[in-house]
């Protein structure tokens, strides 16, 4: 059986092959001549029409998923299909025909397919297509765009005014669920390394209340970009100076004014900064009248900045200021006479001390008075136009402590002698009594210059010893003796 079948197939095999080839050629010829009608699938995007119908009802629509792309089958001659592509068809959805499908709970709009070419030779054979949309309330809002910066200006410079150039009002519309999240609109300019004024066009960014950026893909903004400028100013560090009004209570002294900041950095145009050397806060801000303890207050120094300047750091505006007061105390010091200088002694005259120490009473702040010792007290006395004899010269005391002062008048007892007369009397030796007297005076004067003659001035020595005893550590060591005010 198989042999017979094989023989049949191979018998006249070349003729059979030729017959098959002729059949295929004949079929192709027939097909080309007949041009049969076939169907083919095309794909295109759906374009919404009459969208103002939706917005007029204060609604916002959005295509669901990928329903804005539709596929459909078209019937046409094969030769027509060969000439067509997806771009030769359009799909439109008239929003006035929107309907609600209760079965699916979805809003949908019928889609119409139109052939741009060969419209009379093609027909759409697909079922009715729809554009499915989500429908929600349409929201609108207006936000003032805030100017901001990023980056750091060049050292020695500071930011001045940063502002939007032109309109800064941004109108936004879109889905109410998104629009309701908008909290701020910010335009940010980059000032990194800048030393001169800069202007740029930037895109405003929307933020929610938590500072998160809001996607504007579904929103319509009235401004796509805004112009923003940043002023770059010079800076200068200047000291703060506080003045106090009034006087503390009796028995107290103002020892100083301290502040949480000694210097602040201000910014402004170079010409303006060159005229500023310090910032003075007026007396009215710190009234110390009648106080008996430190007074602390907080001052907003921004109100007292020179015109055309501002603080570089806003945190420097609030400065804590303290007026320091202390009780006034008194102390008496036995000051060595060697600490005093006698000025303007007449030519030919000598001035010699009559005592080894002089009592000086000083009043002042307790903390400063504690740092004074007798050896630190110095002064000068004026002997202008004084002749020979005993004199008590007023002494001008010099104190380094700012809040201490001498109580009463300090006098320095001295003996002024005529040097020429003393020499003549001694050489003549004509009057024994006078000679002895002058000799004694000369000896007393010399002893007073070294430390006071104990033999001839017993009463003065007793007085000095008594003073030393009453003042405790005062005396030969010239230590301080303190008394109550």
Image (cartoon, helix red, strand yellow):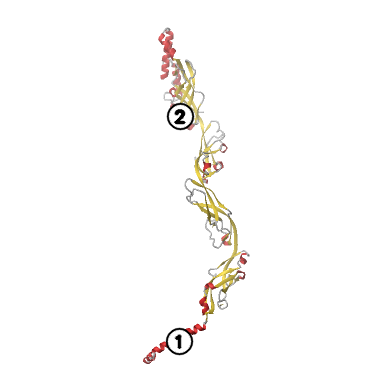
Residue found farthest to the right: 56
Q: Residue at x 42, y 12 (%)?
A: 423
Measured as percent of width and height from the top left, residue 232 is found at: 51, 48
Measured as percent of width and height from the top left, residue 271 is found at: 53, 42
- Can residue 261 be seen in the rendering of this structure? no
**Left or right side of 477 for 290:** right
Please state, as top left, top right, bottom left or bottom right, where the N terminus lies in the image. bottom left
- Can residue 341 be seen in the rendering of this structure? yes
Sequence-earlier tag: 1 or 2:
1
Measured as percent of width and height from the top left, residue 451 is found at: 41, 20
Relative to 317, is 189 above or below? below
Q: Residue at x 43, y 88 (%)?
A: 19
Q: Quadrant of residue 307?
A: top right
Residues 461 and 343: in front is 343
Measured as percent of width and height from the top left, residue 177 is found at: 57, 62
Cα separation between marks 1 and 2: 135 Å
Q: Residues within 10 Å of mark 2 (few under 14, many from 20)?
A: some
Relative to 33, is 134 above or below? above
Residues 194 and 102: in front is 194
Residues 223 and 392: in front is 223
Relative to 221, is 307 above or below? above
Q: Residue at x 60, y 60 (%)?
A: 140
Residue beneath disc 1: 23
Q: Which mark is residue 372?
A: 2
* Tag 2 secondary structure: loop
Q: Which mark is residue 157?
A: none
* Tag 1 secondary structure: helix
């Amino acid at each position: 059986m198989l042999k017979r079948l094989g023989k049949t197939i191979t018998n006249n095999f070349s003729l059979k092959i030729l017959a098959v080839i002729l059949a295929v050629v004949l079929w192709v010829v027939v097909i080309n001549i007949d041009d049969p009608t076939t169907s083919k699938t095309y794909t295109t995007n759906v374009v919404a029409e009459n969208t103002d119908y939706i917005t007029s009802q204060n609604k916002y629509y959005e295509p669901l998923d990928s329903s804005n792309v539709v596929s459909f089958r078209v019937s046409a001659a094969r030769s027509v299909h060969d000439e067509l592509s997806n771009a030769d068809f359009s799909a439109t959805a008239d929003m006035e025909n929107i309907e609600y499908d209760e079965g699916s709970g979805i809003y949908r709009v019928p889609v119409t397919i139109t052939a741009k070419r060969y419209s009379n030779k093609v027909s759409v054979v697909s079922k009715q297509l729809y554009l499915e949309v989500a429908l929600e309330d349409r929201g609108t809002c207006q936000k003032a765009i805030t100017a901001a910066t990023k980056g750091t200006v060049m050292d020695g410079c500071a930011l001045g005014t940063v502002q939007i150039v032109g309109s800064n009002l941004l109108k936004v519309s879109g889905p109410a669920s998104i629009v309701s999240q908008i909290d701020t609109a910010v335009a940010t300019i980059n000032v990194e390394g800048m030393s001169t004024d800069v202007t740029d066009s930037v895109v405003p960014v929307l933020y929610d209340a938590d500072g998160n950026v809001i996607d504007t893909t579904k929103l319509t903004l009235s401004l796509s970009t805004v112009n923003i400028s940043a002023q770059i100013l010079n800076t200068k560090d200047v000291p703060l100076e506080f003045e106090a009004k009034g006087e503390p209570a009796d028995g107290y002294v103002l020892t100083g004014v301290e502040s949480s900041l000694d210097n602040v950095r201000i910014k402004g145009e170079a010409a303006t900064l060159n005229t500023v050397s310090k910032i003075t806060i007026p007396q009215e801000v710190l009234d110390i009248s009648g106080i008996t303890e430190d007074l602390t207050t907080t001052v907003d120094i921004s109100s007292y900045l020179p015109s055309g300047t501002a603080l570089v750091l806003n945190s420097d505006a609030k400065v804590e200021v303290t007026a320091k007061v202390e009780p006034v105390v008194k102390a008496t010091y036995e000051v060595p006479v060697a600490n005093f200088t006698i000025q303007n002694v007449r030519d030919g005259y000598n001035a010699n001390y009559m005592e080894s120490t002089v009592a000086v009473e000083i009043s002042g702040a307790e903390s400063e008075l504690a740092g004074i010792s007798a050896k630190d007290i110095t002064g000068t006395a004026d002997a202008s136009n004084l002749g020979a004899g005993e004199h008590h010269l007023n002494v001008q005391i010099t104190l380094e402590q700012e809040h201490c002062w001498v109580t009463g008048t300090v006098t320095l007892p001295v003996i002024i002698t005529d040097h020429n007369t003393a020499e003549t009397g001694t050489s003549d030796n004509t009057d024994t009594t006078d000679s002895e007297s002058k000799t004694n005076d000369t000896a007393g004067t010399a002893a007073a210059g070294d430390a006071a003659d104990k033999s001839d001035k017993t009463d003065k020595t007793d007085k000095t010893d008594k003073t030393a005893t009453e003042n405790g550590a005062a005396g030969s060591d010239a230590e301080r003796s303190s008394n109550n005010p």
